[in-house]
Amino acid sequence: MRLKPFNTFSLNVYAHRVATAHNEAQLFMLWKQALQMNRPVLLLGSGSNVLFLENYTGIVLLNRIKGIVIQEDAEAWYVHVGAGELWHDLVTYTINRQIPGLENLALIPGYTGSAPIQNIGAYGVELQDFCKYVDIIQLDNGKKIRLSALECQFGYRDSIFKHNYRDNYAIVAVGLRFSKFWRPVLNYGELRLLNPHHITPRQIFDTVCTMRRNKLPNPKIGNAGSFFKNPLIDTKTATQLLTCYPDIPYYPQTNGGVKIAAGWLIDRCKLKGYQFGNAAVYEKQALILINVGHANGSEIATLAKYVRDYVADKFAIWLEPEVRFIGAEGEVDAIGALS
């Protein structure tokens, strides 16, 4: 079955079958059916963070478990969200109900169930800042488990779901906690221009939406958003880099390291607009790779390797892909694929 509608790179790849689950019982049943057919299974939201390198031999299982339940006490709101809820719709839903917190994460594509896997983040805010728990189903026996935020082992664009829980588990719901003592996060981009003493969550939401629409491609242009992670380097390396390039955007981290803007590194290599076959570096935002025509996964991966090697040669920093690479049998090591 054609997967073009189910990956935002708009790659014309195929899977043996695509099935949709609207509840936990369906999800478990479809998984068992796939195993009985001796086929691999790929759980997918909107396909906004995947690169299909080739046709997939297995069954793509779309998680569309919906539902939003809100509770509150004197200190916070508690929101239980089905994995099949679109992330931006959730952000809009909470803002409309005067529940602040997610405004910096507006317009991130994909479904809520994918958010903990990547520990999605933008403009100084990450999912882990609000995550209270993640509900998963153990697909070999149907058992439901609730993992606390601590057990999720969140890191920068990382979590336990990329490692121990990558196979045979499905995220079915996410629990979020929003403090009623809201503080705006205005550390990035145009948000720095806003007055922290006279700002509302809605104004931040609107500003973030404007910034993202200005720098991101039209959704009709195949892309997966930021292709590479912003690299984390030690303070000594950062000091050396800033001596040579004082204009480089950098963000000191609580653990003592420094986050460097990957888009700036690529831009300084003069790679904006660089094209390989039907794949290109987006001319307005160097961190985004786009499908300019009828690209295949191999072309995009080759372009990504070129960009990664170029940055490493110029700055001695190896960029890591944020996008997950999918081969014929399932996920493959992205760094290995680019080495």
Image (cartoon, helix red, strand yellow):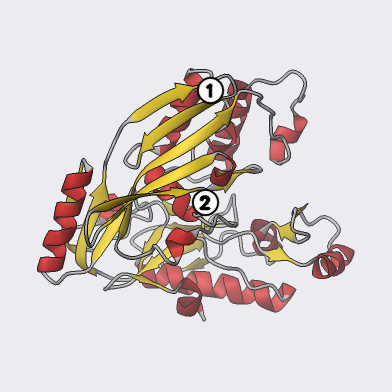
Residue at (44%, 71%) from the top-left corner?
Answer: 301
Tell me the amino acid under the disc marked 1. Answer: Ile
The part of the image, by quadrant, that contains residue 325 is bottom left
Q: Nearer the viewer, residue 71 or 238?
A: 71
Q: Is residue 1 visible?
A: no
The outermost residue toward the right is 243
Q: Is residue 280 visible?
A: yes
Residue at (32%, 72%) from the top-left corner?
Answer: 327
Above or below for 212 versus 280 = above
The quarter in which the N terminus is drawn is bottom left
Q: How many marks?
A: 2
The outermost residue toward the bottom is 339
Above or below for 236 versus 113 = below
The part of the image, by quadrant, that contains residue 330 is bottom left
Which element type, helix, strand or loop, lies under badge 1?
Answer: loop
Label at residue 119: 2
Q: Where is residue 225? Give x, y as percent.
A: 49, 51
Tell me the amino acid under the disc marked 2. Answer: Asn
In this rendering, position of residue 333 left or right of residue 306: left
Q: First in sequence: mark 1 or mark 2? A: 1
Residue at (44%, 38%) from the top-left corner?
Answer: 175
Label at residue 99: 1
Above or below for 222 versus 207 = below
Q: Residues within 10 Å of mark 1 (few under 14, many from 20)?
A: many
In this rendering, position of residue 69 left or right of residue 59: right
Q: Nearer the viewer, residue 168 or 41?
A: 168
Q: What is the C-alpha distance between the residues marked 1 and 2?
A: 20 Å
In this rendering, position of residue 152 left or right of residue 5: right
